Amino acid sequence: MTDPTQKTIELRGGPLHGKRITINSAHTQTTQPVNSADKFSAWVIYRPTQEQCADGTEVWAEYLESHWGDTGLTDL
């Protein structure tokens, strides 16, 4: 029997690409350590996409927040 409060997702992009993890079904993002054995290692944020694996597993992609605004050309 499966737990409806949990789901398995596959991570895409970044250092954890291809890894499958189980998370709470209500979560809209997950933050994962790059190296779970090192509590001081970097962390990566993943968010859901519209993609699914062939077996129906949700695909979540690495999220990179940009602090840069629109960097297009403009008149000075």
Image (cartoon, rainbow, N blue to C red):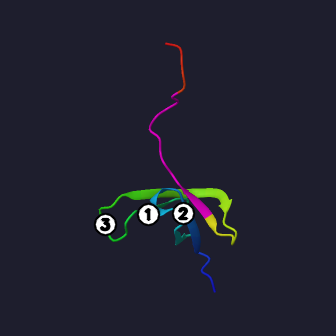
For marks 1 and 3 on the same chain, the one whose residue lies earlier in the sequence: 1
The answer to whether the residue labelled 2 contacts the one labelled 3, judged by CB atoms less than 8 Å apart, is: no
Residue 26 on image: x %, y % = 57, 66
Q: Kindly indicate whether the residue at mark 2 contacts the one at mark 1 (C-beta within 8 angstroms).
A: yes
For the question of whether residue 25 can be seen, the reply is no
Return the residue at label 1.
Answer: 32
Q: Is residue 64 left or right of residue 1?
A: left
* Magenta span main SS: loop
Residue on which the image places disc 3: 39
The front one of 37 and 3 is 37
Q: Residue furthest bottom?
A: 1
- In the figure, is residue 56 to the left or right of 15? right
Task: Give the SS element for disc 2.
Answer: strand
User: Disc 1 to disc 2, how far (Cα)?
Assistant: 10 Å
Is 9 rendered above or below residue 1? above
Which image quadrant is residue 37 in? Answer: bottom left
Q: Earlier in the sequence, mark 1 or mark 2?
A: 2
**Quadrant in the rendering for residue 34:** bottom left
Does the magenta segment cover residue 42?
no
Query: How would you rate the neighbour count of disc 3 (Cα within 10 Å): few for under 14, some for 14-19, many for 20 or more?
Result: few
Q: Which residue is tagged 2?
A: 11
Query: Does dot 1 land on a helix, a strand or a loop?
Result: strand
Mark 1 Cα-neighbour bin, 10 Å: few <14, some 14–19, many ≥20: some
Residue 52 drawn at (x, y percent): 67, 63
Q: Which residues are magenta?
A: 59-71
Q: What amino acid is at disc 3? A: Lys
Image x and y of residue 73, in percent: 54, 21
Instruction: Please tell me whether residue 66 belongs to the stretch shown in magenta.
Output: yes
